[in-house]
Image (cartoon, rainbow, N blue to C red):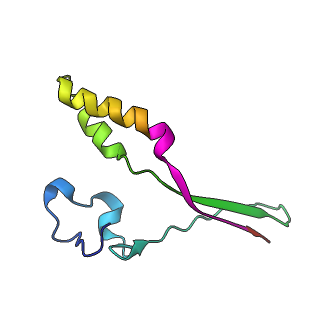
Amino acid sequence: MPHGFDKATANKDIAVTGDAANDPGFTDSGSSVRYVVSIGNATGPFKAEAELWFQPSGFGGRIISAPYKAEEPQRMVRYYEAAARRSAVVLAKAEATR
């Protein structure tokens, strides 16, 4: 969320909904996600890799526009589809072995 965004007072058109609305780790200062992987009886070492991707063209805009068959929303869907394949960039990578 943008710095200064208050999910408690946001307009319903841009409101944070679902579990994120009550998640204390999802704020205008950032968001934390923790993944837990069951390894059963396996023994290490194990290697984990993670990438943080950024895509400037919003997926939400495509979803909102897609059902409308007028030329303007369909043009936005085409713009998104054309840009989406080449606009995403990796911002950070990390790996750990244990």
User: Is 65 or 91 nearer to us in this picture?
Assistant: 91
Q: Is residue 66 in sight in this rendering?
A: no
Against 85, residue 78 (above or below) is above
Q: Which quadrant holds the N terminus? A: bottom left
Q: Which residues make up the magenta segment?
A: 84-95
Asked if the stretch drawn in magenta spans residue 5, the answer is: no
Query: Percent from the top left, x then y, of residue 76?
Result: 27, 34
Q: Is residue 30 above or below residue 11?
A: below
Residue drawn at point x = 31 percent, y = 32 percent: 77
The image position of residue 23, as x and y in percent, is 36, 70
Q: Residue at x 15, y 70 (%)?
A: 9
Q: Residue drawn at (25%, 39%), measured in percent from left and top?
A: 64
Q: Residue 10 is drawn in which quadrant?
A: bottom left
Q: Is residue 94 magenta?
A: yes
Q: Is residue 2 visible?
A: yes
Which quadrant of the rendered structure holds the C terminus? bottom right
The percent position of residue 93, horizontal first and vertical second, equals 63, 63
Q: Quadrant of residue 96?
A: bottom right
- Give the image location of residue 19, x and y in percent: 35, 62
